[in-house]
Structures are given as C-alpha cells and as structure tokens.
Image (spheres, grey):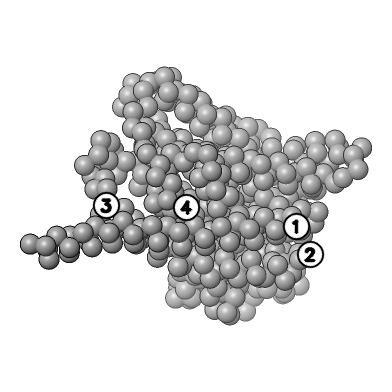
Amino acid sequence: MSFWKGRVFRVRQARNLVPTLLGRVIFIGFSVQIILGILWAFFAMPGFRSFQDSFFYLEVSDTLVWDEYTGILYPLLLRFLRGGCSFLPFSYTLVLYLLQLGAGFLAAAFLMESMWGAKGFWKIWGALVVLTVPVTLLCHLSVLPLSPAGSCLMVQLACLCRIARRNPGKQDLLKLCILQGVFCLLGGLFLPEYVIFGGIAALVTVIVCFHKKCYLGAALLVLACLLSIGGNGLARTPGAWGRMHRSAESMLFERVAYNHLREDSYVWPDGLEIFHQDLRLSGVNHKALDRRDIMGPMIEEQFGVEASKGKYLALTKLYWQIWSKEVLYQIGWDAYGYFLPPPATGSIMEGRGYYNFVAKNYDAFLGDAPWLASKTYGYYLAWFVPAVMLSLVGIACLIWQKKPWKRQGFWRKMVLCPVCLICVGMVPLWYTLQPAGTMDEKNVFVYLGLWYACMAGVCIRILGREKESVK
C-alpha cells in the first residue's frame, strides 16, 4: 500500500514541478528578448528607417492628396508633428516614435489583461513581450501607418477577448462596443485595408450584441465601419499618385503575373502588343511594384480605367495557364512568410524562397547598432520555435492540472476564442493575396503579436497564479 502511495505522491509532485520549470524557462527566454528589444529601441530612437512608404507618406503629408491605397489620418498626423516640432530642438520623428511606442504598449497591455486577466507586473511584462518583437519594434520606430493601424486592431481584438472571458452584461457590452467602434474607425482611417480587418472583428461583436439584445451597440459598430469607409472615400482621388487603380482585376493581375512579364510579352492578348518594344517595361521584372507603378498606368492611359480591367483579367488568365506551378509556389512561400514569420524569415535569409522585402527589413533593423541588432534579430529567429513548443507543453500541463472544461464559461470561450483567431488570421490571408514579390513581415506584426501574447499568457498562467474571474 505504501508503494502505491509513494507513486501517487511522485506523480503529484511531477504534475506541479514540470509546469513550474516550463514557466521559468519561458519567462527567462522572453525576459532576454525584452532586454535586447529595449536596448535596440534606445539606440534606434534617433534614426530614420529609409522605407519607400516612409518617403511616400512624407510626400503625401506635404500635398494632402490621397489615392485609394492611402489612409487619410497618417499624413495629417505627420503634417501636424512636422509643423509643431519645427520650433523644438528635437526631430518630429522622436515624438512620432514615442507616440507609436506608447500606443503599442497600451494596446498590448490591454490585450494581455483582456486575454489572460493579467495585472500589475505580469500585465507590464506581457505587454513588453508583445512590444519587443523585432518586427513590431521596427514598425513602431518607423514612419509607417502600420504602427497606429495595428495598435487599433489590437484594441479591437482585446475587446473580443474581454467579451469571451467575462460574458459582459448589456451596459458593459455597450461600453466595449463604443471602444471597439472608435478604434475600428481610427484603424480604417490610418490604412484602408484595416476597415476589412476591423470590420470582421466588429461583425462578431454585432452578432453578440443581437444575441444579448444590445441593438445600440450593434448600430454604433456598423456606423463606425461606414464612417471609416466614407471618410477615406470622400478624401481620396483614385490614381492621384500615378499608380494603377485598385480593383479585383488589378489585384489578381499583380498576384499572378510576375517574373516573366517582359519575356512573354510576345504572347500578350490583342491590343497589348503595342507595349512589346516600350522601353519603360525593360525593368518591369526586377521590381515587384513596377506592375502597379509602371505597367498598370501605361495600360490605363491607353485603354481607360474600365477597359483596362478586362486586359488585367486576360493577362491573369494567360500567365496562370503558362506559369501556374510557379504562381502556386510563390503563393505558398508568401503564405508561409505571413502565417509563420520567424521560421519563414530564417529560411529566406538562408537563400530559399523568392523575391521579398525581408532583406530590406533586416538592413533597416541593423541601423546604428549593427552588432546589437544582429544579436537581437538572431535571438528572435532562434527563440520562436522553442518558445512555441514549450508553450504547447505548458498548455497540456495546465489542462492536466486544472481541468478547465469543468469551469463555468469554458464552452463559451471555446466558441469565441477561435473566432478571435479567425479575425486576426484574415490579416496574413489578405496580404498573401497581395502582389507577388512583396512579402513583408511588417504587415502582419499584429498577428505575430497574438502569437507572443498567447505564449506569454501561458507563462503568466503557470507562474503568475492569476485567477480568472467570470461574471
């Protein structure tokens, strides 16, 4: 009898000891990331990352002319800061970076509190885990609208998580609807595609509102989405910056037709053969966005915007017939890069894949402290997969210990939490369908942040002993 008692005691000890050891390893791993990220941010704060979009938005802030690819708020913010900081002894970029970092930190802290009920030290630590991912820091310390737009989407996701965890009453749900509506509106005005991402999150909340008969909250969310669409629509002038007009046909053309545009020009559909000897197309194979900046405008100038849609569709069908295997290969690499950025980035830096913006991002990250930046980026690539594996084992241990399916509200979370993941999963899916050769992990920093929020949350559950309160 004593033999079996001893075995049971050792099993109980292991059940408590294994999660604790896992939690400490995860905590140490992410704490190293936080230290490296803070050090890099300190040295990177005075610098300017020379992204093409950064120069473009500065130019838009001078002219205040928007096209269909441009949100209206970020150029206005840049114009305000450039004018206001002209009388100060420091650059407007310093103020912008501090604002973007502050917004990103607050959004991440709100997400950690909403997802895991984190408070105090663990809330700050979890927010820093999300914030100090190198790709995230690169967005926040650059002149790019991705930073504020992504922070707005993170707040919306936090609202969804709060609804899933707390099952709020009608009044609390209305407050969350107001908060989510405000950030849905702001996110869409910073970047037009964030109307789609925020709109999906808003749609989920609208369904919950109808279930709880909170019709005012649902109406406010619908109004916020409409205002975001209308605000951008009223301000924009399609084609104002000489780029191809955005449409479903042009997006398909950019996604499918890429590498062989120049050499296959002799089989182009009727009407397009006039461009065969055009010198402006001589380098169209070498830059992914030349289809948008050079070839598309040439076709639209010749045939008109509406008639050009048929030409784009004909080119798409032609290149799909000839190069379908290569197109699928490129889509597969883009999907890999967007859905699993760290391992995909490591593979790309080893020479695999095809044309993308990973090398440009890495060069920008090196900045003024290349040794520190290379170590920080290398640690980010090396730590991600072990952190995921340790977190999965930690989740298994927590399930074994706490038997969460017996708790009140478990099945509600099992429905709403995957819905949250689907909402944020639309971000990498959308960018996978964007032009071939433009894979850029900065576009999905919010999605990547959710990975890190989940892994940090496992550590918080193990070490923080946070008790979940369910209303």
Horizontal and vertical percent for residue 118?
A: 46, 41
Identify the residue under disc 4. 456
The residue positioned farthest toward the left in the image shown? 1
Location of the C terminus by quadrant is top left
Horizontal and vertical percent for residue 98?
A: 72, 44
Q: Nearer the viewer, residue 7 or 190?
A: 7
Q: Nearer the viewer, mark 4 or mark 2?
A: 4
Q: Nearer the viewer, mark 1 or mark 4?
A: 4
Earlier sequence position, callout 3 versus callout 4: 3
Asked whether residue 343 appears in the rendered view, the answer is yes
The residue positioned farthest toward the front in the image shown? 2
Tell me the distance, in whole angstroms, between the alpha carbons under discs 3 and 4: 19 Å
Horizontal and vertical percent for residue 250?
A: 57, 56
Q: Are marks 2 and 1 in contact (CB under 8 Å)?
A: yes
Tell me the distance, in whole angstroms, between the alpha carbons under discs 1 and 4: 25 Å
Earlier sequence position, callout 1 versus callout 4: 1
**Crowdedness near tag 1: few (<14), some (14–19) or many (≥20) residues, C-alpha within 10 Å:** many
Location of the N terminus by quadrant is bottom left
Earlier sequence position, callout 4 versus callout 2: 2
User: Which three-letter amino acid code belongs to the residue tagged 3?
Assistant: Gln
Element type where label 2 sits in the image: loop
